[in-house]
Image (tube, rainbow, N blue to C red):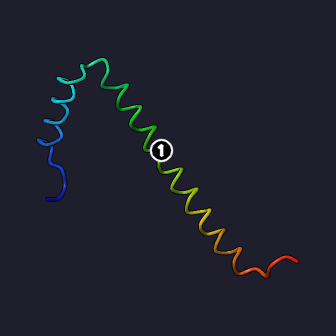
Amino acid sequence: MGRFQFSDIAILLVLGILLFGAKRLPELAKAFGKSITEFKRGMNNLSDDIKSGNQDKDLPPKA
């Protein structure tokens, strides 16, 4: 277990080409990248919401 070696990446690339075809592979990679970006953005927003929620508890209640 550890880092991927070149042979591992090459095997995955060949399997991807065989399963999806050479034309669809770049589209799938682009969609995967966008979904990862959206996931990170959502996690950052959640983290910011949690931090701001904790700060609101430290403030005195409004009358």
Q: Is 42 situated above or below 62?
A: above
**How many labels were placed on the picture?**
1
Q: Quick check: 13 above or below 19?
A: below
Residue furthest out toward the right: 63
Horizontal side of 36 relative to 12 (left or right) equals right
Q: Seen in the image, is 37 located left or right of residue 57?
A: left
Residue 56 image offset from top left, x and y in percent:
71, 73
| Other-residue count near label 1 (Cα within 10 Å), few / some / many at <14 / 14–19 / ≥20 | few
Residue type of the residue flagged with mark 1: Thr
The residue shown at (70%, 81%) is 58
Comparing 13 with 53, the one in front is: 53
Q: Position of residue 11 (x, y in %)?
A: 13, 36
Seen from the viewer's position, the closer of residues 51 and 63 is 63
How far across and down, in percent of the image, does residue 41 sit?
Answer: 53, 50
Secondary element at image label 1? helix
Quadrant containing the N terminus is: bottom left
